[in-house]
Amino acid sequence: MFPALLHDALTVGAVLFVLGLVGILTRRNLIVMFLSAELMLQGISVSLVAWSRYHGDFGGQALVVFVLTVAACEAAVALVFVLQAFSRTGRLDAAAWQSLRDAEVPRRIDRELPATDAAPPVWPQLTPAGVRPRRDETAEPEREHV
Amino acid sequence: MIAALLPTGTTPLLAAAVASGTVSLWLLLPQAPGSDWLGHRRGALGLVLGVAALAALAWAGRRLGGLGDEAVFQIVSLVAIVGGAATVVTRSPVYSAIWFALALAGVAGVLLVLGAQFLGVATIVVYAGAILVMFLFVLMLAQPSGLAPYDRVSNEPLLAAIAGGVLLALLTTSIGRLSADPPACCTIPSRADAVATAPVGPAAADALAADPLARLGRELFGRHLLAVEAAGLLLLVALVGAIAVVSRGEVAEATRKGAS
Amino acid sequence: MPPNLPATLLVLVPLLPLLAGLVTIVFGRRLGPRVHMPAVIGIGAATGAALLLLVAAGGTGGGTHEAPRPAETTVTLWQWATIDRAIDPQPGSPAALPGIAVGSTDSGTRPLSLAVTLRLDPLTATMLLVITSIGLLVAIYSIGYMHDDPDQPRFFALVSMFVFSMAMLVASSSFLLVYVFWEAVGACSYLLIGFWFRRPEAARAAKKAFLVNRVGDFGLAIAVFLLWLTYGTLDFHDVRATDGTILPGILGQTRLADAGGFVGGTVGTLICLCLLLAASGKSAQVPLHVWLPDAMEGPTPASALIHAATMVTAGVYLVARCAPLFVVSPGALAVVSLVGATTALVAALIGTVQTDLKRVLAYSTISQLGYMFASLGTGTLAGFTAAIFHLVTHACFKALLFLGAGSVMHAMGGVIDMRRFGGLRAVMPITAATFFVGSLALAGVPPFAGFFSKDEILAALHARGWPDAHGGVHHDHEPAAGAPAAVRTARLVPSTAAPVVPAAWRSTAPAATPQAVGPLDWLAGAGLYRGLFWMSLITAGLTAFYTFRAVFMTFTGPLRLPPEAAHAHGGHGPDDAHGTHGHGQRGHESHGHASAPNAHGHTAAAVDAAASHESPPVMTRPLVILAGASLVIGWLLFATHGLGGFLAATPSLTAPAVVATRVPPAFHLDLAIQGTLAAAIGIALAAIGHLGRRSDAPSLERFLGPLQTLFARRFFFDEIEHAVVVRPLESLAWFAALVDRVVIDGLVDAVARVPAALGDIVRRGQAGVLQRYSLAGVAGVLAVLLALAWQLWQ
């Protein structure tokens, strides 16, 4: 009987890969795009290990080690570039860069989005102990949302 | 009847799982509100369909028998897939990263089930411990407050979901066809069979039989020694390169400021 | 003379001017004031070689005076191209002469073998000497004439190249080479007419000459094609193949010895008419003569060399060379004569009212060329030799007249309108004297050159017009003077020397020849030639009239100079660049005439400036040499019968049909008297009208009435050709341009719009958005995977 383990592991790997692919194609945040790419790599790693076990050969696992290594390198370099891009546009938007379009095609502009209707979240506050701490009014207020 | 229409290697259950998963993905991806008639119900509908797709997938795996029956594998793979899907569909990139950490945990579990102990642990350590933290740092540096507009919309979600669905259908179908003609030379028994028929001695064929960590080490530093060295060099180069790019960018920034 | 010397000289004659031309082209600017040296030295050496060749050609002639043997020497320089089995001649056709192996290749086919071969025979030697000697004198004259022109290198290079091309044209021994150099002389002519191309008239005249010549060249091309199809070769001479068989050339001795070697009938007539068309274009015969008067826009030395002495005689040479082809087509011969005599008369009539000195000479050239064609058209040996004789003498005196006109023009500051100057005899004595000699020669006054050659032409025409004058048919060479029937035509034309003609000419159809009857042979009756004879006689009178009208208007009467002559230093026209005449300001009219301003608003020049007006010696010496030649050459050649006997050894003229017309040389006193009388009447009329009068005074022309308009407008040839040829062509061109713009361009644009439209669709995808590109890439991968799955899972 053909090992069902191979089937299931390969299916899991395929699903992860496809999820990562869809993420790459749809999400416009550069960070999330990289997360999706890593997800694709995870899918591949699962498939490689499954085949490695199927063949009783550790070559597949060795390859996954290299995948890890390259992913680390890629993350380091790519994040630097993301930072550079951010420092130029102030955005992490992949669609912020459209210079390569044809001269007669208009620039893509996002539709105006309605404001989020969610109420601002209430953040926990430390109860004052002893002296009420002085609050610096000029400091940047904490983010209401991450 | 439906099965007759499907190509060999797939089943109606698997097909249903792929289809509902595709629709679910499309519904859950961030989209501007009011873009269709579903409105606020799209999130709930997407969740329902996603759960249905996962259930169908688990059911299809269950019918395959073998190790798929094992609850551990079911659970870790479920964690990996749910984490991955949430990574993709969550609006906030910070939450995305955290969902990704969950997916990594699932993947590590799958690897452990598959007998790759070193890799499972390394995934947790390297990814969750180092890479993901780096992502989070960058997000702290760069993410503006609140949800940016580009986080609230997706690029061509329908087309991308359809493309993903087609690819998944192709992959699962081809995986299903693997059993149609198993190469006799390469069949490896399932764990139960392996344990039952395992030859005694150092020449055991089963990867799980004896000391896999040592064998992986021998593999890496034997057959792949040069590649390991090259990987080390690659890490160094990436390190140097990242620092160089960052510092040059800072110099450029300083020049720009000085000029203005 | 060593055996190889003629061949060497034959190559040297064209080669030296070619080298001179190349040297002038390459080093022209560096030569500075010695820019004329290569041309003068090269052409001079070629003249020497041509003189030696004359001896060589005569030396190889051999044969008796009555039965000359053909004399030719051929030099094959290199094989240009060879095409095996190019033609398969039908048995019995002229391409496959009976009794001669038709070629070395199998199944009787024959190769198209194009060799660069030069030939030497008396006709070529004569032409070469004319070309090189006139070319030399013109080159020397140009040293003075073109003295201050900044483009001297171009001029001398073109003159050298022209001499090379013309020498090759007459020395080539293949119709294809003749065609090549026919075009080459045309190109040189075009470039020299348009030498001052910045003047719109010169550019227009050059274009006109080129286009009109093109019509004639078209005829030559057709003739070459027809000759190839008919005779299976393009060579003049016989070619001995490597296996010893002989490929008979079109004008080779093998074919000449064969009575049936030449094709008559329709094809033969067609070939001859095409050749005549070519000759008409190059030699300015009606109706293709319109380019020659306009060609006077070129520098006068070039006009003298190309458009008076040499290039325009290429047509005469071509017809004479192809004499065996013509004599079997009497109809074509008749057309040649008709065209020639008509041209002679029409051009002479136009010449009577021209006021531009160079144009008078241009129409005179056309007229004299018409004489030569009329003579060629007789188809007799006498006619052919008379044409060449007239060619030689005409080259002398017409070059003299043109150079004299150039001298006048040079001194008058570019003015050439005869009404604006007069009495130049006092100012330019050498020019006047030499011009007078040339005019006497042109008018046919004994004993000047033109008299003898014109007399021979009239005699040849007369012989065809009155062949029965002496009864009997003579194919042998008995003296005809004693023929008893001479008195029968005495009342019409007293004839002391009756030519002898074949029987064929006495009827309208040449039934006695074995050839097929051509479609135009009915023309070739005696009546036609009688008419042509009278036309020629009238033309002789007209020639004398317009020549001496020009002489009297220019050189006699009260001295008058145009203001441009005084300002010759100022560069009035391109022709007045010579700045050495310092005759001072405008003076007063001489001879005691009232000093009232004349019609042109200026007074006459001072007579004391006269001496300084004569052209420099480098220009007058060629005039003197040519005047001397014009004086003696006719008498010399006639008295010794040198040219006739010399030319008789030309292979083309040894065809049996030509030799059969041979008559002993004689002096035709009656014709000479008539011709001289006609000339005397013409001169007398000119003297009545113009001698001693102001040249801008109205004269005899006023008696012509409407005819004067007809002549002055040149019989409306230009207008007719414009309406008949140019206008329809312009309409056609307009229509073609319309089709090109609307249909062709529309199609091209439509084809171009298809990719543009497709691109408009596809370019929408080029939004510059990264993820769209990724999506497209994934879609492509999916398409490939689906196709693979479709293939593998079937």
Image: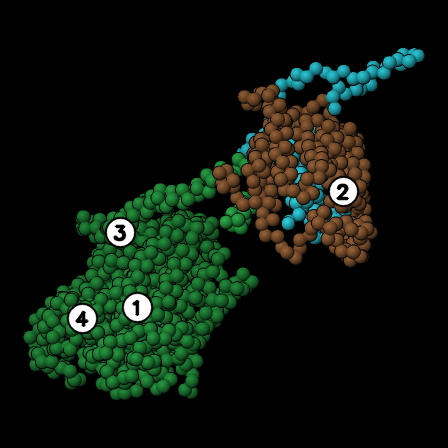
Chain colours: A cyan, B brown, C green
How many angstroms separate mark 4 from mark 3 (CA)? 30 Å
Q: Pointer 4 indicates a residue of which chain?
A: C
Q: Nearer the viewer, residue C596 or C721?
A: C721
**Rendered image quadrant of residue A137:** top right
- Give the answer, above or below, for where C734 lies relative to C34: above
Q: Pointer 2 indicates a residue of which chain?
A: B
Q: Nearer the viewer, residue C666 or C620?
A: C666
Q: Dot 4 surroundings within 10 Å: few (below 14), some, or many (20 or more)?
A: some
**Rendered image quadrant of residue C547:** bottom left
The residue located at (35%, 57%) in the rendering is C210
Which amino acid type corresponds to the residue marked 3 in the rendered image? Answer: Val
The residue that disc 1 covers is C224
Which amino acid type corresponds to the residue marked 2 in the rendered image? Answer: Leu
Q: Dot 3 surroundings within 10 Å: few (below 14), some, or many (20 or more)?
A: few
How many angstroms separate mark 1 from mark 2 (CA)? 98 Å
Are dots 4 and 2 on a single chain? no
How many angstroms separate mark 4 from mark 1 (CA)? 17 Å
In the image, which disc is placed on residue B112?
Answer: 2
The mark that comes first in sequence, 4 or 3, is 4
The residue located at (38%, 44%) in the rendering is C747
**Rendered image quadrant of residue B91:** top right
Residue A64 appears anywhere in the view: yes
The residue that disc 3 covers is C725
The residue that disc 4 covers is C265
The mark that comes first in sequence, 4 or 1, is 1
Are dots 4 and 1 on a single chain? yes
Q: Is residue A11 left or right of residue C681?
A: right
Residue C17, position as x, y percentages in the image: 45, 70
How many angstroms separate mark 1 from mark 3 (CA)? 25 Å
Are dots 4 and 3 on a single chain? yes
